[in-house]
C-alpha cells in the first residue's frame, strides 16, 4: 500500500512538471556578454504561456517594469522593448500563467561590456 501511494505521488509530480512551460531560448542568451544594449529582449517558450509581468534590474538602480504592450494573450514567443541604461549587468525576471492555470516564473541575465 505504501509503494502504491509513493508511485501515485511520483506520477502526479511528473505530470504537473510536464504541464509547465520552460524557456527554450532568450535573446540575449542567458549569461551572454554583448557589446551594446539591445533594443528588444525576447523569450521563446516550449509551450503556450501568458506573460503577466516582466521586470528589469540594472546594477543597483531601482527595478523597472517592462511594457507588455499588446502581448497579453497566450503564445510561445514574446518580444519586448528594452530601454537600456548602459554598460553593466542586467537581470530580466518574468512571471506568467500556463494554459493549465499554473503560475510560472524565471529569469535570465546578460552583461553589456
Image (cartoon, rainbow, N blue to C red):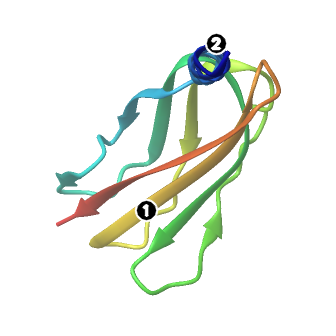
Determine whether 42 is above or below 60 in the image. Answer: above
- The foreground one among 109 and 40 is 109
Determine whether 5 is above or below 92 in the image. Answer: above
Q: Quadrant of the C terminus?
A: bottom left
Please state the total of marks drawn on the protein image.
2
How packed is label 2: few (under 14 Cα within 10 Å), some, or many (20 or more)? few
Name the residue rendered at 34%, 72% in the picture.
86
For the residues labelled 2 and 1, say whether their Cβ atoms are less than 8 Å apart.
no
Kindly identify which numbered label has been placed on residue 91. Answer: 1
- Disc 1 secondary structure class: strand
Q: Quadrant of the N terminus?
A: top right
Name the residue rendered at 35%, 56% in the picture.
109
**Pointer 2 or 1: first along the chain:** 2
Residue 19, quarter of the rendered image: top right
How packed is label 1: few (under 14 Cα within 10 Å), some, or many (20 or more)? some
Across and down, in percent, residue 81 comes to: 56, 47
- Disc 2 secondary structure class: helix
Name the residue rendered at 42%, 73% in the picture.
85
Determine whether 86 is above or below 33 in the image. Answer: below
Q: Residue furthest bottom?
A: 60
Left or right, 107 with respect to 68, comes to left
Across and down, in percent, residue 103 comes to: 74, 39
Left or right, 93 with respect to 98, comes to left
| Whole-number angstrom distance, CA of label 2 to CA of label 1 | 43 Å
Q: Which residue is mark 2?
A: 4
Left or right, 40 with respect to 87, comes to right
Across and down, in percent, residue 42 comes to: 48, 35
Residue 7, quarter of the rendered image: top right
Amino acid at each position: 500500500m505504501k509503494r502504491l501511494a509513493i508511485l501515485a505521488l511520483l506520477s502526479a509530480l511528473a505530470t504537473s512538471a510536464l504541464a509547465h512551460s520552460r524557456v527554450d531560448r532568450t535573446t540575449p542568451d542567458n549569461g551572454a556578454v554583448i557589446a551594446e544594449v539591445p533594443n528588444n529582449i525576447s523569450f521563446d517558450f516550449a509551450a503556450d504561456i501568458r506573460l503577466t509581468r516582466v521586470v528589469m534590474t540594472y546594477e543597483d538602480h531601482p527595478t523597472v517594469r517592462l511594457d507588455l504592450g499588446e502581448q497579453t494573450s497566450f503564445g510561445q514567443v514574446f518580444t519586448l522593448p528594452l530601454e537600456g541604461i548602459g554598460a553593466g549587468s542586467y537581470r530580466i525576471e518574468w512571471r506568467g500563467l500556463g494554459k493549465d492555470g499554473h503560475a510560472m516564473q524565471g529569469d535570465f541575465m546578460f552583461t553589456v561590456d
